Image (cartoon, helix red, strand yellow):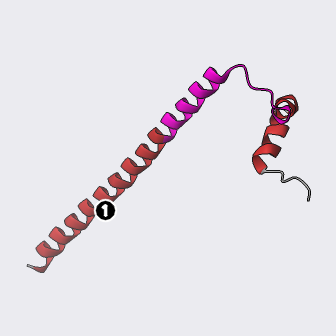
Amino acid sequence: MPPIVRASEIGSYLYCRRAWWYRKQGVESENRGELASGTELHMQHGRAVMAAGLLQIAGFVLLLAAIAMIVYELSGLILR
């Protein structure tokens, strides 16, 4: 059975063939601290992006609620 090649391996190979080869040979990275720091930074950024998206959705919901209330009030004035 041929070995399974994952998409992440292909991406790693295309980004840096030497790093891919080292990983296949079992050579550990020397900058593990920097890699961990970068991973944490990306996670923080992802959480900030998600929070911004949720706030944007909440803003749209509140805007629609305000428009609905204005339409309701104006329709009440017109019917009187």
Q: Is 38 in the magenta?
A: yes
Give the residue type at disc 1. Leu
- Identity of the residue furthest to the left in this view: 80
Whole-percent x, y for residue 79 in the image? 12, 80
Give whichever of 4, 66 is nearer the camera: 4
- Mark 1 secondary-structure assignment: helix
Give whichever of 40, 71 is nearer the camera: 40
Looking at the image, which residue is at 33% across and 52% down?
59
Q: Is 65 in the magenta?
A: no
Looking at the image, which residue is at 11% across and 72% down?
77
Main secondary structure type of the part rendered in magenta:
helix
Whole-percent x, y for residue 78 in the image? 14, 76
Looking at the figure, which quarter contains the N terminus? bottom right
Give whichever of 54, 10 is nearer the camera: 10
Whole-percent x, y for residue 39 in the image? 58, 32
Please state if 23 lies on the left or on the right of 54 as rendered: right
Give whichever of 20, 74 is nearer the camera: 20
- Identity of the residue furthest to the right in this view: 2
Vertical position of residue 42 compared to residue 3: above or below: above
Please state if 31 lies on the left or on the right of 3 as rendered: left
Q: Quadrant of residue 80?
A: bottom left
Looking at the image, which residue is at 75% across and 26% down?
28
Vertical position of residue 68 compared to residue 38: above or below: below
List the residue tagged with mark 1. Answer: 64
Tell me where the magenta segment starts and ends, as one range.
23-46
Looking at the image, which residue is at 81% across and 33% down?
23
- Identity of the residue furthest to the bottom in this view: 79
